[in-house]
Amino acid sequence: MALPADAGMRFGTQVNPDHQLTVWDGVGDPAVYMGSISQDGQSLAFSEVDLHIPVAGSRSVMWVCVSASDDTPPGLTSVEFTVGDRISPSTSIEVL
């Protein structure tokens, strides 16, 4: 997963870095996976993640904690989730 380029965003907060992915399973129970952050701090990598997708065409709900810095431009943005060769933007994040 990756943060938007040149947006001044981070995973977690300035005082509490957070490198985890939370995935909801089919009954609403969360599963937490710890990730490895890239050297530039702009992406997280995860392995062995169970997306809890029972059949083709199903969807999975997942999230990470991100925060904006004072330099992040206001407006809408998103992070990118990559699974295999598929890239999907998150729901919109509004920076105030």
Image (cartoon, rainbow, N blue to C red):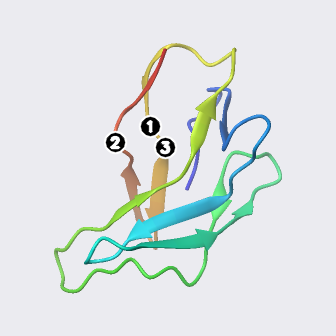
Q: Which residue is mark 1?
A: 78
Residue picked out by circle 2? 91
> What's the residue at 53%, 52% (across, down)?
64
Badge 3, how many Cα within 10 Å: few under 14, some, many 20+? many
The location of residue 80, given as percent across then percent down, is 47, 49
Tag on residue 93?
A: none
> Is 53 displayed left or right of 31 in the figure?
left
Q: Residue at x 70, y 37 (%)?
A: 13
Mark 1–mark 2 contact, CB under 8 Å?
Answer: yes
Q: Which residue is mark 3?
A: 79
Estimate how packed mark 2 is, as few (under 14), some (14 to 19) or many (20 or more) residues with alpha carbons within 10 Å.
Answer: few
Q: Does dot 1 land on a helix, a strand or a loop?
A: loop
Residues at circles 3 and 1 in contact by the CB criterion of under 8 Å = yes
Compared to 53, does 74 lie above or below? above
The single residue placed furthest to the right in the displayed view is: 39
**Above-or-below relation of 21 to 6:** below
Marks 2 and 3, the one that precedes in the sequence? 3
Amino acid type, residue under disc 1 in the picture:
Ser
Give the Cα distance between marks 3 and 1: 4 Å
> In the picture, residue 10 is in which quadrant?
top right
The type of residue carrying mark 2 is Thr
Residue 85 appears left or right of 68? left
Marks 1 and 2, how far apart in space? 6 Å
Work out whether residue 19 or residue 38 is closer to the camera in this orientation and state it: 19
Q: Is residue 71 above or below residue 50?
A: above
Q: x, y (%) of residue 63?
A: 46, 55
